[in-house]
Amino acid sequence: MPHDTSLSALLKRLKENPWACAGLIKDSRLIGVVHAHSILKTMDENSGRVMATPKECACSELAFTDADTPLTSFMQKYSNKDFEHIVVCKPNGQMQIISQDSHQKIQNFQETPLGTILPTAAPSLALEESETCLKALEGLSVETMPYLVTTSEGHPTGIVSRKDIASAIQTQKNIWQVSIKEVADYRYPVIADDTPIGQTLCTLESAKDPLFICQNSPTNQCWVVETAHLNKHIAHALNPLFAEFSHIAQRTTTQGLLHARLLDRTVNEAMNVGVIAISPQLVIQYCNKVAGKLLDLTDDIVGKKLSELGANGIKAFNSVEPVLKALDKDVSPVVNLDLPNTYSPSLQAKVTGIWENRIVNGYILTIEDTTDVKIAETKLRKLAYYDPLTGLPNRALLFERLSMEVKKSRREQSKFAVVFVDLDRFKEVNDKHGHKVGDALLSEVASRFSSAVRDSDTVARLGGDEFLFILPNMESKQTLAIVIYKVLRSICAPFEINGLSLSIGASFGSAYYPEDGTTPEDLIEHADKNMYKSKKNTTTC
């Protein structure tokens, strides 16, 4: 962050984030590193002066190095320099600050003997004499001992590869007369096992040797060491330290170190959605204010496992934990969250995995209150599928249900009926008393129709004064006639509307699946024709 940030602001930021230290930026350049404990000490010494700036307690002695710099080169470059922090620069612009502890461990390699870190359980065979003939080496295992050390009068003289020995044995005509020294390579250095690691690294870096001979002086025991293996061994020894300080590694842009992290946090807090970061061990690492408010979570949620949350949190995350454990790389599932509050909004969490080489390295939950969206969807669906006047299914929902009933009956080889209904004398009522009375009458008719049939039946309004019934599992026409009579009787009683007593009737026409049609259109057309026949020939109530 900027080098002139106030100490109080910086300390607050360090408390909000689990950082051990922060980088200080001036003119887009890293100029120093400051620790939380240094800030506290400086504030104490200045009687809590909150307007002091972190540059007063920052360390500016830094060592910069690229992430791909060989450790040997780094040791050689900085072996005689005093610095408190190492700044590792990565190709993608990221930086990692390594503290004095890590530096100290690297410095320790200047004094640690080489033999203390090298495996000595299975040293390469040290031949007594380099004059040994190739015949004596037949049958040696290349896999278990890839190299041999040649000796002369007990002192190491060179290295020979088992593969080279095997090749020589196959190509030489007289392996009794060819000695091992004719195959061995004498250019590799011999380094005593009590040589400090730092000195060893510098020696190898100067010579660029891929191999060297390590010798135990008292016993003259020797073994071959690959330089790459030594570097890997040292890097592995440093890994715990790098891991220990990995939480302070921050991305850097042209605006400087830590800017991107601060920007990310500011954006997350400004968003209208909840954001929660969870570690691979299902520990909450970050929770913005929106998420805390939506889930009714307390400020101390960071650092807790999902299973340790309070009553609201446990229930909300019960559906999340199984999804996290079974998450696939190319999938970002959406999970419904439940809350036991009196007012329970509809919350949805989108789960996104943070993947590195197909291994999940954490999770991000983005949480939204979808209550308004669901209410709007319900309203839209009602407008799209239901008649606003009567509340009955409209023509669109009727065809959808009729199509489903056709498929069901075809699959189960069952029968169902469709009944077309047209009200009699409704036009007279509407013309005489107005649309307001007419609308009230239609609404009351719809209510009586719905009460006259089963819950599994569908009563829909096609438009105007036309209605249509879907009657599933209607196995006989006699039963159908009884249902139609019941529906007719339901509207024969006068309707009392706005002080008026209104009497109407209805004409019915039916169609039977599959006898009268096998598609929704055919069934409705057949029922419509039968309705007009009944209107001409039948007198209703």
Image (spheres, helix red, strand yellow):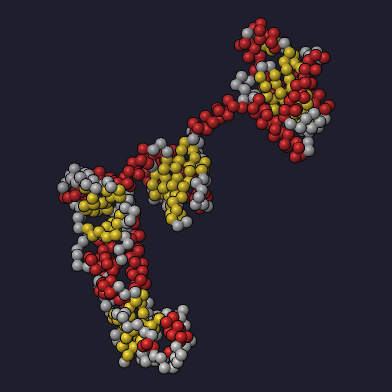
Placement of the C terminus among the 4 image quadrants? top right
Q: How many marks?
A: 0
Among the 4 quarters of the image, the one containing residue 80: bottom left
Q: Residue at x 38, y 85 (%)?
A: 183
Among the 4 quarters of the image, the one containing residue 12: top left
84 or 522: nearer the viewer? 522
Drawn side of residue 464 relative to residue 315, left or right = right
Q: Tell me: residue 83, above or below residue 303.
A: below
Among the 4 quarters of the image, the one containing residue 459: top right
Q: Residue at x 73, y 34 (%)?
A: 406
Q: Tell me: residue 191, above or below residue 262.
A: below
Q: Tell me: residue 516, above or below residue 206.
A: above
72 or 421: nearer the viewer? 72
495 or 57: nearer the viewer? 57
Q: Residue at x 51, y 48 (%)?
A: 331
Residue extending farthest bottom: 177
Q: Residue at x 23, y 46 (%)?
A: 2
Residue 506 picture location, percent across and down: 75, 16
Residue 538 picture location, percent across and down: 81, 15
Residue 445 picture location, percent across and down: 68, 17
Q: Tell me: residue 142, above or below residue 329.
A: below
Drawn side of residue 450 relative to residue 189, left or right = right
Drawn side of residue 417 relative to residue 218, left or right = right
Q: Is residue 145 visible?
A: no
Residue extending farthest top: 432
Drawn side of residue 156 relative to residue 37, left or right = right
Q: Is residue 72 visible?
A: yes
500 or 272: nearer the viewer? 272
Residue 334 picture location, percent across and down: 51, 43
Residue extending farthest left: 46
